[in-house]
Image: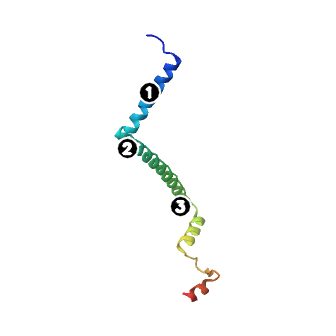
Amino acid sequence: MPRLSPRARIIVKKIVIAAAVLYVLFNPYSYRLVKLSLEERRIKNEIARLNRENSALSAEIKRLESDPEYYGYVVRRELGMIKPGEVEYRFVPSGYFKKKNKE
C-alpha cells in the first residue's frame, strides 16, 4: 500500500471530520443523547448538593442530641419559647406605625 502524501492525509482527515460532524448533526438520536447528558449532569449536581445538605443536617441532629445549651438556644430561636422567669422584649422596626397609619 503506497504512503499518502501530506496533502492527501490532510484531505482524508478533513473528510473524516466532516463525516463525523454530518453524522452527529443529522443523526436523530444525537440531540437526545446531548439532552440526556446535560440532564444527567444536572441530576448529579443535585445529588451532590443534597448529600452535602444531608451531612449538615446530620451534624445538626448530633449537636442537638449532645449539647443541651445549643438545644435550648435553638428551641428559643426557632419556637420563640422562653425560660421560666425570663422576660421577652420585642422591638418594633422604625417607621412601622407610620406605614400602618397610611394603609
Q: Is residue 4 left or right of residue 83?
A: left
Which residue matches tag 3? 65
Which residue matches tag 1? 16
Q: Residue furthest left?
A: 28
The alpha-carbon separation of the residues under discs 2 and 3 comes to: 48 Å
19 or 66, which is in the foreground? 19
Q: Quadrant of the C terminus?
A: bottom right
Q: Residue furthest right?
A: 94
Q: Position of residue 84 (x, y in %)?
A: 58, 79
Please, what is the three-letter code of the amino acid marked with disc 1? Answer: Val
Tell me the element at label 3.
helix
Q: Is residue 8 left or right of residue 87?
A: left
Q: Residue furthest top?
A: 1
Quarter of the image for residue 67 reads bottom right
User: Residue sitting at 40 percent across and 36 percent down?
Assistant: 24
Say whether disc 2 or disc 1 marks the residue closer to the N-terminus.
Answer: 1
Circle nearer the viewer, 2 or 3: 2
Which residue matches tag 2? 32
Q: Residues within 10 Å of mark 1 (few under 14, many from 20)?
A: few
The alpha-carbon separation of the residues under discs 1 and 3 comes to: 65 Å
User: Residue sitting at 65 percent across and 81 percent down?
Assistant: 94
Tell me if residue 101 comes above or below residue 4 in the rendering: below
Please, what is the three-letter code of the amino acid marked with disc 2? Answer: Arg
